[in-house]
Amino acid sequence: MAVPTGDSLESPRLTSAQRVLSILGVFDTENLSLSLSEISRRTGLTLSTTHRLVNELRCWGALSRSGDGKYSIGLRILELGTLTPQGGQLREIALPYLHDLQHATRANIHLGVPQGHDIVYIESLRARDTVPVPSRLGGRWPMHATGTGLVLLAHSSQEFQEEVLASKLRRYTENTLTDPDALRHFLAEVRKAGVAVVESQLTRDVMAVAVPIRGPRDHVVAAVGITVPSGSVSPRSLVPALSASARSISRALGAPSAAAGGPPRRPAHWQVREVKYSTSVAQREPGLVGG
């Protein structure tokens, strides 16, 4: 949602609901906690209006206040989020399979659904003694910057893909794939393979492997991914467990194709460091897309 700024927020034409939503809208992955003055400045609301609305949101549970006086999103928002058909029900169905997947791989596990041009994580399981990643429950990231997001983008309509590719694609590392032509090529490979492998897209020295989850009409409704340190394990070794988990979740959701099963296909692997398919990966892992 576009958050109005400046004096426009104090316009009589702006409803109370819009002012409340503008306050909630200033929190994101880079601004998890904000002071009252920061909220006022970012929304354009006067300090007195911000104080009144923030206090109402805190009393209701939408915001919480820490000891240093800063505010963050409250548990009431998370509680409501679990009630959404797209997120809560899917998470409840998927969670046992995600725990099994983490036990089998000892990796970080992420379950994400599309929202606009982004992917939102409705579950994020952190493994012990493994690579730290910024992804978290409720976290939102652009589709082009994550393995799970690329899977969702690859299985979206051509019109939506072009809409995303025409937008400003943020670069998180020197390896983040932002070239539209390169992205088109990779998305076609992911759609064909059904599996994506990316390295250092969002976080340096992290490899992500992701596959789609399908719903009752076999439409892709979510993506599940694994993140591990780059070079710590062969991506090929992770695909069978990951694909089996996705197939089980899809079957539980009523996807017709999930009942048939079948072996996983060759993953599409992208090493963005040289903005080309990684020859080093192809030599190390025969059968992965390379060259």
Image (cartoon, grey):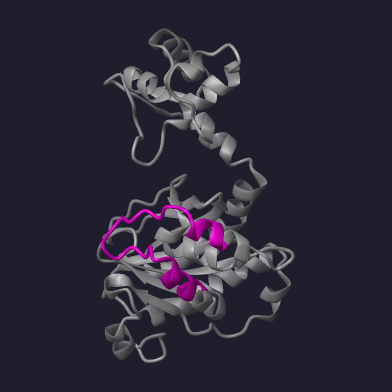
Q: Residue at x 25, y 66 (%)?
A: 205
Rendered view: 8 above or below 206: above
Q: Position of residue 284 (x, y in %)?
A: 29, 88
In the picture, measured across the screen, residue 87 lies left or right of residue 215, that is: left
Q: Nearer the viewer, residue 132 or 5?
A: 5
Rendered view: 24 above or below 288: above
Rendered view: 56 above or below 120: above
Q: Could you tell me how many numbered marks the image carries?
A: 0
The N terminus appears in which quarter of the rendering?
top right
Q: Residue at x 50, y 75 (%)?
A: 190
Q: Quadrant of residue 32?
A: top left
Q: Magenta stretch? A: 161-187
Rendered view: 257 above or below 14: below
Q: Position of residue 101 (x, y in %)?
A: 47, 67
Q: Is residue 9 visible?
A: yes
Q: Nearer the viewer, residue 114 or 85?
A: 114
> Is 208 contained in the magenta span?
no
Q: Nearer the viewer, residue 99 or 187?
A: 187
Q: Position of residue 188 (x, y in %)?
A: 53, 76
Q: Is residue 97 visible?
A: no
Q: Position of residue 201 (x, y in %)?
A: 34, 63
The C terminus appears in which quarter of the rendering?
bottom left
Q: Residue at x 56, y 49 (%)?
A: 115
Q: Residue at x 38, y 22 (%)?
A: 39
Q: Quadrant of residue 127?
A: bottom left
